[in-house]
Image: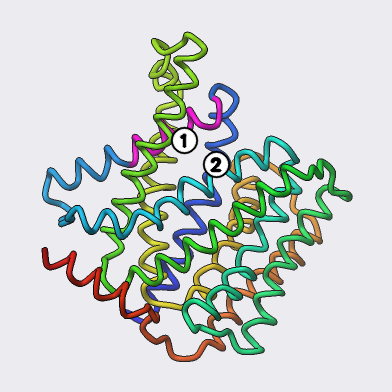
Amino acid sequence: MKRYLPYLAGLGVAMAWGLSFLFTKGALDYLEPFHLLGLRFAAALGAMSALRLANIIKIKMTAGDYLHLLPLAVFQPILYFSAETMGVLLTSASYSAMMIAAIPIVVATLGSFLLRERPNQMQFLFIIASVAGVIFIIMMDNQSISGINPLGTLALIGAVVSAAFYNIYSRKASVHYSPLQTTWVMMVVGAVAFNLIALLQHLLAGKISLYLQPLTVLWPSIIYLGVASSVGAFFLYNYLLSKVTASQASVFANLITVVAIAGGVIFRGETVTWYHLMGTAAILAGVWGTNRFAQKVKTPTTDSETSNRIRSSSRS
């Protein structure tokens, strides 16, 4: 059973992030993107803090630990969510989703150089199949992809690269830090950065007194996005990255499309078409094949200087 835990974690990530679209869409009808992100990560940090105070989870951190995990937290959630938000605002949801679907390919490429985790030919074919399944569904849903904008495209490329580097950094960090430690730093940095941006926006608009008002109506969405989709999903994803290669982990993200389709059918009465089924089959096959043909996972490779600094900070 233990050998299947990473894959169950990957399914949990897909479930949490896939269903998050239902909550995000409703919340964005009332909130600006960075306001939602600020409240979301504040809820996430509050939930983890409560668990720490109750001794349900134990997280020991030093100043050096925060410093070494800061690059990871900058890539995800700060740069990724900021770039994705700008990309969606400047392009379209369908075009953005197609761009984001390319993350596993970029992760596989970067992982080959930075982690020395090279997908074999069979794995790479299945990664392509998974990405193709996502793109096929999106293109068939929209028939044509509109909203292409140079600046928006650049922002989405930044989101893809940020997500890929997060995969790499989390995989490297797993040598010395637990998934709980990594997730804690991500939630701290996310809560501070996004709330500073949102508070500044409210201050400039003269609406600072209304900052917490949306919680009276949107608290279920904020709790889900903060606790399940941030704390829960990122913890499971960091755990997954500590057990399998970056390429294997990243391909699970394409299951989000499958979960989003299922969520639309169950909760919103949407219709499933033949191309949804074909695309879903390609995604599922891609996830299965990428992990089925994986070689034995080795400890991520880090340069000796970085490793020595991390070890010394952990002992301080």
> Disc 1 vs disc 2: Cβ atoms closer than 8 Å?
no
Location of residue 15 with respect to 45 vertically, above or below: below
Which residue is farthest right? 144
Q: Which residue is mark 2?
A: 82
User: Does the stretch in magenta take in 235?
Assistant: no
Could you classify mark 1 by the number of other residues whose Cα lies within 10 Å: few (under 14), some (14-19), or many (20 or more)? Answer: many
**In the image, residue 45 lies at what x, y percent?**
30, 41
Q: Is residue 164 left or right of residue 144?
A: left
Q: Is residue 257 left or right of residue 272?
A: left
Q: Is residue 115 left or right of residue 3?
A: right
Dividing the picture into quadrants, the one containing residue 90 is top right
Which mark is first along the chain, 2 or 1? Answer: 1
Which residue is farthest front? 305
Q: Which residue is mark 1?
A: 37
Location of residue 179 with respect to 17 vertically, above or below: below
Q: Secondary structure at mark 1?
A: helix
- What's the residue type where badge 2 is placed? Ser
Q: Which portion, as a residue range, is magenta?
A: 32-44
Q: Residue at the location (52% across, 12% down)? A: 205
Location of residue 216 with respect to 70 vertically, above or below: above
- What's the residue type where badge 1 is placed? Leu
Q: Residue at the location (19% across, 53% down)? A: 63
**In the image, residue 14 lies at what x, y percent?**
52, 58
Location of residue 198 with respect to 61 vertically, above or below: above
Q: Residue at the location (33% across, 55% down)? A: 183
Question: How would you classify the magenta stretch by its main secondary structure?
Answer: helix
**In the image, residue 19 lies at what x, y percent?**
53, 47
Q: Residue at the location (55% across, 36% down)? A: 24
